[in-house]
Image: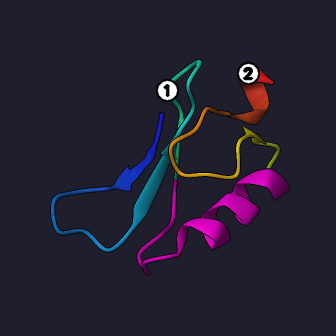
Amino acid sequence: MTAIPVEHGAVALLLICDDCGRGLDGGAVREEWIVLWHRAVVEGWTGRDRAIGPHRCRSCT
């Protein structure tokens, strides 16, 4: 999956697991992709370090 805006015109990104569809959002403040990805890795996500994926959450790794 990809990192996508949470809503049209929103300021937060959403990272989506390719296996289960679980999401990790960037919060209320827009985060650059690399900041969101670093936080995801700390929380146990795996995958490519690019916003186009693939990505997997801690439960699916």
**Residue type marked 2:** Cys
Q: Residues within 10 Å of mark 2 (few under 14, many from 20)?
A: some
Magenta residues span: 25-42
Instruction: Give the mark nearest the N terminus, 2 or 1.
Output: 1
Q: Position of residue 59 (x, y in %)?
A: 75, 26
Q: Is residue 24 magenta?
A: no
Left or right of residue 15: residue 6: left
Q: Which residue is mark 2?
A: 60
Q: Which residue is mark 1?
A: 21
Hey, which residue is sitting farthest left in the picture? 8
Q: Nearer the viewer, residue 35 or 7?
A: 35
Figure quadrant of residue 36: bottom right
Hey, which residue is sitting farthest bottom in the picture? 29
Work out how far the residue at label 2 is from the one at label 1, CA to CA, in angstroms.
10 Å
> Which image quarter holds the C terminus?
top right
Q: Is residue 35 magenta?
A: yes
Left or right of residue 23: residue 50: right
